[in-house]
């Protein structure tokens, strides 16, 4: 069983629905990080907006190290969490060039966005396969620009779980936010 938790300050229901739709596996548990004493295999930190959330997440990360932590590389407080180092694989997602995962060539289309999902630094997936730098053309059918970040998180999780690129492109393209 692979446990994927989403933490941070902002509303996470869309990201959790997006992950649940795309992962669609009986061997994966996806949820919001509420109970700070359960270990996640994959922890996603979408953002941190206040000191209280920062301290909760900092204590959690050092008490229950996750195998892989995916964080918003454009979020200042999220980046400060890792100032002293961790025993986890850290993958940053964002629009800045220092992130491990970036989005480029972003264009708004009628029902959503098209962009290139770019792996800037290699990482291993849970099956031990090395994911080397690459670009994947992606189409999403969600209209808010912040959903590009959610897409970066979701696609990264799918690569970590060992999904094939064509399958990833197809599943993220078919997700539509209904709630």
Image: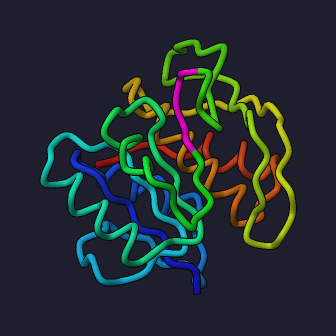
Give the quarter of the image for residue 31: bottom left
Q: Residue at x 46, y 42 (%)?
A: 150
- Please name whichever residue, 98 or 134, is drawn nearer the observer in this view of the structure: 98
Q: How many marks?
A: 0
Quadrant for the N terminus in the image: bottom right
Is 113 above or below relative to 128? Answer: above
Single out the residue that lies furthest toward the front: 84
Q: Was residue 57 drawn as part of the magenta stretch in this picture?
A: no
- Please name whichever residue, 154 or 101, is drawn nearer the observer in this view of the structure: 101
In the rendered view, does 23 fall on the left or right side of 83? right
Is 21 above or below relative to 24? Answer: above
Colour mapping used in the image? rainbow
Q: Where does the image place residue 138, in percent across and percent down from the top left?
A: 68, 32
Q: Residue at x 53, y 40 (%)?
A: 151
Q: Residue at x 44, y 40 (%)?
A: 72
In the rendered view, does 166 fall on the left or right side of 70? right
Give the quarter of the image for residue 137: top right
In the rendered view, does 69 fall on the left or right side of 139? left
Is 168 above or below relative to 27? Answer: above
Magenta residue span: 92-96
Q: Where does the image place residue 22, in percent across and percent down from the top left?
A: 58, 58
Give the quarter of the image for residue 33: bottom left
Is 6 above or below relative to 8? Answer: below
- Please name whichever residue, 54 or 119, is drawn nearer the observer in this view of the structure: 54
- Magenta-drawn stretch, dominant element (helix, strand or loop): strand
Q: Residue at x 51, y 62 (%)?
A: 86
Q: Where does the image place residue 13, in percent across and percent down from the top left?
A: 30, 54
């Amino acid at each position: 069983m692979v446990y994927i938790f989403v933490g941070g300050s902002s509303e996470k229901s869309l990201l959790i629905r997006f992950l649940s739709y795309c992962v669609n596996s009986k061997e994966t548990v996806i949820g919001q990080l509420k109970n700070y004493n359960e270990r996640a295999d994959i922890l996603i930190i979408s953002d941190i907006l206040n000191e209280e959330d920062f301290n909760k997440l900092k204590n959690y990360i050092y008490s229950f190290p996750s195998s892989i932590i995916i964080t918003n590389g454009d979020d200042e407080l999220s980046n400060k969490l890792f100032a002293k180092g961790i025993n986890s694989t850290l993958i940053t997602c964002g629009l800045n060039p220092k992130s491990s995962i970036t989005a480029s060539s972003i264009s708004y289309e009628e029902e959503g966005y098209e962009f290139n999902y770019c792996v800037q630094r290699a990482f291993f997936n849970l099956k031990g396969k090395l994911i080397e730098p690459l670009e994947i053309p992606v189409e999403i059918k969600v209209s808010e620009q912040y959903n590009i970040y959610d897409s970066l998180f979701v696609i990264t999780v799918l690569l970590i779980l060992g999904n094939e690129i064509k399958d990833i492109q197809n599943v993220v393209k078919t997700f539509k936010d209904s709630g």
